[in-house]
Image (cartoon, rainbow, N blue to C red):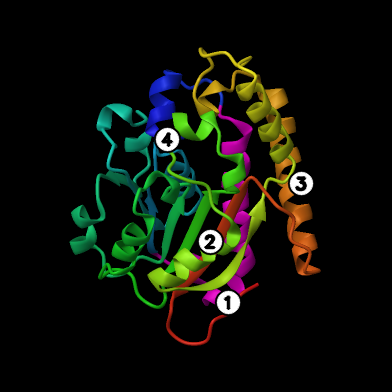
């Protein structure tokens, strides 16, 4: 969840199924490419979550990979925005910039930028600066997600201070210019496109409530319904991935890309 959304939400009672499903999808995609990473996640290492927002993903990753040092980075991060239980997770820490920690790290093994680039006006320079860091080398794995399809740009994006949405080709081109060699890329969340189209229609007819909470902060349903929606979203992702193996690429509300610094033969799936 973005800090903007967290401030709008106040106390978080229940996570949006989109957040929960995206976390599982990220972990699923990492597991799919693990055989080619020489057992990377069986040893100690460093995972960065750049643009970590309220720290939800970083927190969960730290719990799933207890032998890793997990570092959440967000320019808007403040201790008062953190979770009181963070101090109970010994391998988790938060900072405002990479510069605050790059002298303490020899190499970052995994760098996540989940729905970050759309918040940056000059996304090309931003990603290039990240890639030029001393702690990132040919073995560092980069994981990017962004909102998809500029045609779906709506009040939702404006509220969250998005500059744009991306096509998968645009994300690939941006990553290539920054020096990322693509391992895997695709779309996810096909079914929610229909909901977003409906929301855009409602916005244009001026029927939407101006008091609606921002983004995922507006989720107020219980655990049972949340669980059902999360399962539907994960099934949606798995179906899209199966079709992708048959060279059928469904559109999605989000795009993802996994890659490394360009150093050798490019592999894409």
Q: Which residue is mark 1?
A: 36
Quarter the C terminus occupies: bottom right
Q: Quick one: label 4, few (<14), some, or many (20+) residues within 10 Å?
A: many
Q: CA distance from mark 3 to mark 4?
A: 25 Å
Asked if disc 4 and disc 2 are in contact, CB closer than 8 Å, the reply is: no
Q: CA distance from mark 4 to mark 2?
A: 23 Å
Q: Which region of the structure is painted magenta?
A: 15-44
Q: Please give the count of numbered marks on the rendered protein.
A: 4
Query: In the image, which disc is placed on residue 170?
Result: 2
Q: Residue at x 61, y 40 (%)?
A: 152
What SS does tag 4 mark?
A: loop
Asked if disc 2 and disc 1 are in contact, CB closer than 8 Å, the reply is: no
Q: Which numbered disc, 3 or 2, marks the residue closer to the eye? A: 2
Query: In the image, which disc is placed on residue 235?
Result: 3
Q: CA distance from mark 4 to mark 1?
A: 32 Å
Q: CA distance from mark 2 to mark 1?
A: 26 Å
Quarter-wise, where is residue 85 in the image?
top left
| Any part of residue 42 in sight | no
Q: Which of marks 4 and 3 precedes in the sequence? A: 4
Query: In the image, which disc is placed on residue 2?
Result: 4
Q: Residue at x 67, y 49 (%)?
A: 252
Residue ranking furthest to the bottom:
264
């Amino acid at each position: 969840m973005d800090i903007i959304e967290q401030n709008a939400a106040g106390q978080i009672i229940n996570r949006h199924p989109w957040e929960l499903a995206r976390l599982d999808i990220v972990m699923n995609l990492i597991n799919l490419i693990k055989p080619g990473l020489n057992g990377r996640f069986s040893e100690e290492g460093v995972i960065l979550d750049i643009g970590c927002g309220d720290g939800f993903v970083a927190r969960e990753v730290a719990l799933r990979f207890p032998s890793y040092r997990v570092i959440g980075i967000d320019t808007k991060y403040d201790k008062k925005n953190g979770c009181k239980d963070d101090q109970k997770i010994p391998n988790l820490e938060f900072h405002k910039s990479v510069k605050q920690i790059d002298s303490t790290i020899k190499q970052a093994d995994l760098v996540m930028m989940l729905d970050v680039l759309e918040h940056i006006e000059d996304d090309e320079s931003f990603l290039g600066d990240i890639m030029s860091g001393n702690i990132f080398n040919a073995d560092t794995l980069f994981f990017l997600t962004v909102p998809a399809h500029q045609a779906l740009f709506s009040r939702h994006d404006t509220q969250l201070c998005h500059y744009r949405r991306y096509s998968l080709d645009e994300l690939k081109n941006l990553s290539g210019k920054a020096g990322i060699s693509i391992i895997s890329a695709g779309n996810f969340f096909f079914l929610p496109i229909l909901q977003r189209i409906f929301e855009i229609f409602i916005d244009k007819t001026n029927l939407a409530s101006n008091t609606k909470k921002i983004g995922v902060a507006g989720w107020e349903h219980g655990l049972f319904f949340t669980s059902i929606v999360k399962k539907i979203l994960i099934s949606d992702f798995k179906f899209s991935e199966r079709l992708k193996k048959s060279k059928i690429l469904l559109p999605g509300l989000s795009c993802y890309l996994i890659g490394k610094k360009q150093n050798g033969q490019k592999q894409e799936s």
